[in-house]
Image (tube, grey):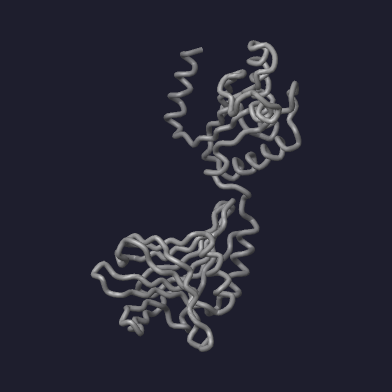
Amino acid sequence: MRPRLLFFLPLLILLPSAAGALTFQTKLEQVQWSVEGDRFECRLSQPIADFGVGVFIRRAGERPVFRVQAGEAWFAEGSALLYAAAAPWQSSHSNLQLGTVTTKQRYVLSNQQQAGRLLTGLLEGRAPMVRHRTLEGRPLEVRLQPAEFANAYRDYLACTENLLPVNYEQIKQTSVNFDANSLDLTSQARAKLDVLLEFMQEDPSINRIYLDGHSDNSGDRLLNRDVSRRRALVVKAYMMAKGVEEDRFIVRFNGERYPLKPNNSATNRAANRRVAIRLERIDQEIAEQLEQIDFERD
C-alpha cells in the first residue's frame, strides 16, 4: 500500500534575517510532512509556504538526495550554502554548515552525503536551510521546519524498505558470467537475473531485451562462436521460464570477438565468458518497424 499523502495550505512567514535576508518558512503550527512512493522512488517532503517544497528523494538502488524546488525563479544560478540549522530553542547549538549545493533558478540540489546529514539533523531537531541570493542579488534564506518529523520519517523508512534493489539506470546494462567449458548458470548469475526479472515485472515499459553471447579465446574460433550462442540461449530460456515473452528478446552471439579484457590470464578470460544484457524501452510503433527490418534481413 502506498504511504498516505498529506495535503495542506500553509501560511507564509517572510522574515528578515540578521543579515537582512528574505526568509521563507512555514509557521510551526502549520507544518506538515508528506510521504509518497512506490517501488522505484520514495519522497519525504514539506511544502514551504508561498515558495515551493523541500523534499528528500530516494531512488531504488541509491541513497537519498535533498532538493528545494521553488514555484518561481527565485534562485540566482551558482552555488548556495546548505546548513543543518539549530532550532530557536537550541540556544547552545550553532548552525552546521554542510558545504555548497548546486543552484538553478527554480531549485537547489544536494549530494547524497549532505542529504544523510540533514536527515540526521532533523531527528535531532535541526532545520535544513539554504542560504543564497535572489535573481536581483538580495540575500535569501529558505528553511524547512523539524516539527512533526519523527512520525513522517518512520513512514518514509517503511517506504524505502519496499524499494527495488536497483533502478533502471543501474540495471539497463548488465552481464552474467559462465565458468570455463560450461553452459550452466552459476548461482551468482541466477541471482543477478532474478534481480533483473523483479525489476522488469514492476516496469512493463521494458519491451526489448538484447542478449549478446561472448566467450574467451580458448579453443576453436567456430566452437567459441557456438558456445556464445548457446550461453545466450540459456539466459533466454531462464528468463522465459520466469514469464518473459519470447518476442521481447533479440539474441546475438559474438564468440571471442569484443573481449572486455585481454585473454592473457585466467581472471581476464573469466570476465570475457559472459552474456551481456541490455534492456530498452521502445515505443510500440518503433518496435514493430524494427521487427519488420529483422524479418526482412532473415
Q: Using residue 283 as the reference point, say whether residue 191 is left or right of it.
A: right
Q: How many marks?
A: 0
Q: Quadrant of residue 80?
A: bottom left
Q: Is residue 12 above or below residue 100?
A: below
Q: Using residue 251 as the reference point, say whether residue 269 is left or right of it.
A: right
Q: Is residue 235 above or below residue 2?
A: above
| Residue 241 in the image, given as x and y percentages of width and height | 70, 31
Q: Residue furthest front?
A: 264
Q: Residue furthest left?
A: 136
Q: Using residue 238 as the reference point, say whether residue 59 is left or right of it.
A: left
Q: Residue at x 55, y 38 (%)?
A: 172
| Residue 283 in the image, given as x and y percentages of width and height | 44, 34
Q: Quadrant of the N terminus?
A: bottom right
Q: Residue at x 57, y 19 (%)?
A: 257
| Residue 265 in the image, given as x and y percentages of width and height | 68, 26
Of 173 and 78, the residue lying toward us: 78
| Residue 243 in the image, given as x and y percentages of width and height | 66, 34
Q: Residue at x 54, y 65 (%)?
A: 35
Q: Residue at x 47, y 72 (%)?
A: 97
Q: Is residue 153 above or below residue 248?
A: below
